[in-house]
Image: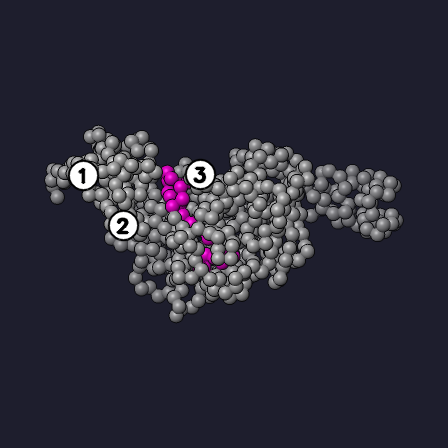
Amino acid sequence: MPKKTAACCLFAAIAAGVVAASAGESTDSAGRLDPGIGSRRPVSARAVGLADRGLIALHVYTRPGTRPANAISVYPLGDTDLSLVITTPDQAKIIAARPGVLWVEQAPEPTPRNDTVRLIAQTGTINPGPFDAAGLDGAGQIVGVLDTRLDWDHCAFDDPDHPIGPLHRKILAYNVPFAGVDAHGTHVCGILAGDSTMNTNLRGTATGARIVYNTIPAFDESPLLQRLELHASQGATIHNNSWGDDQSSTYGGLARAVDSFCWQHDENLVVFAVSNGSTLKTPENAKNALAVAATQDSPMQSKFCLGAAGPTADGRRKPDLVAPGCSVFSAYPFGGTCNTVFNSGTSMSAPVISGAAAIARQYFVDGWYPTGSPDPADAFTPSGALLKAVLVAGAADLTDEPGWPSDREGWGRVMLTGSLPLPGSGFSLIVDQAFNNTADALETGDARLIRFEVVDEAEPMRIVLAWHDAPGDFGAADPVVNDLDLSLETPGGAVYLGNHIDMLTGESTTGGTPDTRNNVEVVALPTPDAGVYTVRIDGAMISTGAQGFGLVITGGIATIPEPCGPADLTDPLGVLDLADVTAFVQAFAAQAPEADIVADGVFDLADIAAFVQAFAAGCP
């Protein structure tokens, strides 16, 4: 089309839109109009050209089929349509008042939508990501994806130099015969781990992570548990599932498969998108699944978008977290090898969480804990429960959503800078864990105590305990099997129990009874007093095996060294020296309890021999 003709058509559409918007429409646009309209600085040449003529580009979100007459282009997004409208700034309020219009905003540019999602997962904003700058991008981590057909030739995933397998830069395994491509699976994988130098829209949440892929299990194919186990055998420790059964909320085969897998393979974390309807379904109702709902993308990342509200049918808290999932740009397999499209749904938010989990896992396996800088000597393998606790500990309350935690946002929007300190962070992190059915795991009556000190009262403190419970019975009305209890004792002797939180203030309260239903428990103190605190984890009811856990403590905190043995009697703890010998001699002479090394109530040569033996053994 000649440029002059195209320009005439554009201005005709604009003029028609202005007239239509002004003719007989209500001006009641309350709650539908972005107050920032007109305040954006144009960046692209096209936006600058529009501004020079007194025009702006609007994104108008409507119910399907109720599109503005003056739309330049329309993009179906499932339960909504997005229309691009070019008009004058004063017409935005009139357009927002039209029937069927859900939201009107000035078209954001030039920030790519998927790139924005990646940054929000790190910092909660679209500011440059500190984890990117530190080299924490999920490198070395493998994520299993069950979804519709992934387009391996898309530039977000392609590798001209290597076939799919161990050397491929993105896809280690494609576990089904190739049979075409699909938009959903390609879009989800792009949000999770896409990476292309040709299009910044194609930078996923964890650009360094790699994928093992399979299709969603149909009723006549290998079941979910087998597919999760296959991906685990191929190296995956995080598993993304942007799908579910919207016809059941029962604790049935799918939910139980998730719980069984996580109980047996508790190095793994399984992420599920919740239903886009109003009621939680399955398998997001699994106890061990990390269930995810969706927020808007930038600049409305603190605004809830969609996802089923909790609790589960048996009263457990779900969803666990939220992440950007509406109007998210990512890979599109049709019309070219590097195309993008934006889409909305909890399907889009789940891979943001999975990507964030991959970055968190890299943080630990590359030795960034506890110093905030990489040291291979500090590397360890985190459990899936510990990763879940890390993501919950850093989550941000949605300011547009009443109450925290809530049945829609769970524990909030993922934000890695809230729980994983880097150099210059104003807070510290303490973690502890035990794997299921190991010597450190808890049985009924066992307790684990962790002492620490609050050194900065200005930093909010959050303590999160998570565990992967054993699977319940099929169809169980109450599928809880093993119960742990979290409590915190303050310097003043007050005791806070897990999940006793005032939703209006977001602060833990004293009193109440232990939570016997949820396998994520939280204590939150926005303004903790300075002093020594004690976290206690109790094995309240362990009916099957020995129960592992992941514990995370964040805030202005410091660890308290513990004695390395009975001979370590003086500061600095963890070091055996002459001061410890002197302390033992004095305690023995005074018949003080710390000199009764063999704990028989008698102070004799046996205690001296035990002290000498412990002193000679030294500290680890």
Instruction: Find residue 161 and report its image quarter.
Output: bottom left
Label 2 Cα neighbours within 10 Å, binned few <14 / some 14-19 / many ≥20: some
Quick check: 121 above or below 178?
Answer: above
Examine the structure image and report whether residue 537 is included in the region drawn in magenta: no
Among the 4 quarters of the image, the one containing residue 51: top left
Using the image as rendered, state which of residue 163 and residue 220 is in the foreground: 220
Q: Position of residue 123 (x, y in %)?
A: 45, 39
Residue appearing at x 58%, y 45% in the figure = 500
Residue toward you, 223 or 23: 23
Residue located 68% across and 39% down the image: 493
Disc number for residue 20: 1
The residues bearing labels 2 and 1 have C-alpha atoms spaced at a distance of 20 Å
> Mark 3 to mark 2: distance in Å?
28 Å
Q: Position of residue 271 (x, y in %)?
A: 46, 54
Instruction: Compute the Cα span from label 3 to label 1.
Output: 36 Å
Q: Which residue is mark 3?
A: 399
Q: Which residues are magenta?
A: 282-305
Secondary structure beneath dot 1 equals helix
Q: Answer with left or right where residue 324 lies relative to residue 557.
A: left
Q: In the image, what residue type sits under mark 3?
A: Thr
Query: Which amino acid does the dot numbered 2 rest on?
Result: Pro
